[in-house]
Image (spheres, rainbow, N blue to C red):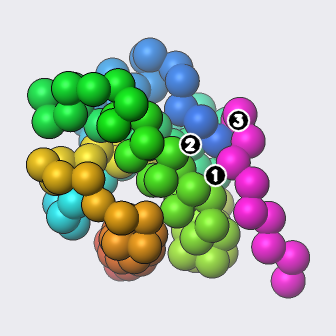
Amino acid sequence: MHLMQTFTKTERLTSKLLIDKLVEKGKSFNNSPFKLVWIELQEANTSAQVVITVPKRNFKKAVDRNKLKRRIREAYRKCKQELLYDKLEDKKLCLMFVYIAKEKLEYSTIELKVKESLQRLTTTINS
């Protein structure tokens, strides 16, 4: 099986309407340091579209927020195929990773938590 470890533009959730719908009607769970919000939508372009947010309230400096977003994006890119795409049949999802921790975590910790969150998400959706 060929593993596509990319994060293309179509996989990014940029539509303001979809993000609003996700915030209003999305289901969520906390898996520290993340809150994962998701909604099943047929109008999504790919099987999963993702938006990553790091609140300004917790990290005042844009440098810190951007560094965390890059770490989360990289972790998602590396483990989305095996944990998400291979387990979702024809479902289309919109996801939001909200970083809720108050401190900056190392990449290895973030990667582990992203994996845990995606595993929990697939078991929740497929059950």
Along the viewing direction, whichever of 21 and 7 lies nearer the viewer: 7
Q: Tag count in the figure?
A: 3
Overall secondary structure of the magenta stretch? loop
Q: Is residue 32 left or right of residue 13?
A: left
Residue 2 figure quarter: bottom right
Disc nearer the start of the sequence (1/3): 3
Of helix, strand and loop, which one carries label 2? strand
Q: Work out whether residue 89 can be spotted.
A: no
91 over 127 or under it: above or below: above
Disc nearer the start of the sequence (3/2): 3
The boundaries of the magenta stretch are: 1-10
Instruction: Residue under label 3, please give it.
Output: 10
Instruction: Residue under label 1, please give it.
Output: 47
Location of the N terminus by quadrant is bottom right
Residue 26: x and y, percent? 28, 42
Q: Amino acid at mark 1?
A: Ser
Instruction: Residue under label 2, please give it.
Output: 49
Q: Nearer the viewer, mark 1 or mark 3?
A: 3
Residue 85 figure quarter: bottom right
Q: Residue at x 57, y 56 (%)?
A: 74
Q: Work out whether residue 63 can be spotted.
A: yes
Query: Is 92 colored magenta in this rendering?
Result: no
Q: Which mark is residue 124?
A: none
Q: Amino acid at mark 2?
A: Gln
- C-alpha separation, residue under disc 1 versus residue under disc 2: 7 Å
Location of the C terminus by quadrant is bottom left
44 over 61 or under it: above or below: below
Q: Amino acid at mark 3?
A: Thr
